[in-house]
């Protein structure tokens, strides 16, 4: 599919302002290194329409869990988030952590 075809498909499609999380898939990740903070990757499906891949479940030094956004390394060697939520990112993060806790 070309970019023009994708644009024509999306033209006229009204995106909902409140997309629902319809699925969270957890991929446990064990590096074998006890000092690694990465515990799992997660993919999130919104309204059975959009899949966002690459969320990371990480553990803090104090033992708490948090969700890292999908990111990519830039030419300068720094990592940049690939997904940005304008509001309610805590809802998404909580759903990912709930799914991780159920899985583990």
Image (cartoon, grey):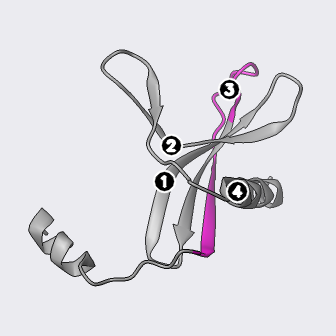
In the image, residue 85 sits, relative to residue 9, either above or below, namely above
Q: Which residue is mark 1?
A: 53
Question: Could you tell me which secondary element the residue under label 1 belongs to?
Answer: strand
Tell me how far mark 2 sits from mark 1, CA to CA. Answer: 7 Å
Q: Position of residue 24 (x, y in %)?
A: 63, 65
- Position of 63 with respect to 30 (left or right) is right
Give the quarter of the image for residue 4. bottom left
Instruction: State which tag comes first along the sequence, 3 or 2.
Output: 3
Label 2 sits on residue = 70
Label whose residue precedes the other's in the sequence (4 or 1) = 1
For the residue pair 31 and 16, the one nearer the viewer reads as 16
Residue at image mark 4: 96
Q: Are marks 3 and 2 in contact (CB under 8 Å)?
A: no
As helix, strand or loop, the secondary structure at mark 4 comes to: helix
Q: Which residue is mark 3?
A: 32
Residue 27 drawn at (x, y percent): 61, 51
């Amino acid at each position: 599919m070309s970019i023009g075809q994708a644009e024509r498909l999306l033209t006229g499609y009204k995106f909902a302002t409140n997309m629902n999380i319809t699925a969270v898939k957890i991929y446990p990740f064990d590096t074998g290194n006890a000092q690694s903070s990465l515990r799992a990757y997660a993919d999130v499906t919104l309204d059975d329409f959009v899949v966002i891949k690459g969320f990371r479940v990480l553990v803090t030094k104090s033992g708490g869990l948090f969700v890292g956004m999908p990111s990519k390394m830039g030419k300068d060697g720094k990592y940049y988030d690939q997904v940005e939520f304008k509001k309610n990112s805590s809802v998404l993060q909580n759903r990912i952590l709930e799914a991780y806790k159920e899985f583990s």
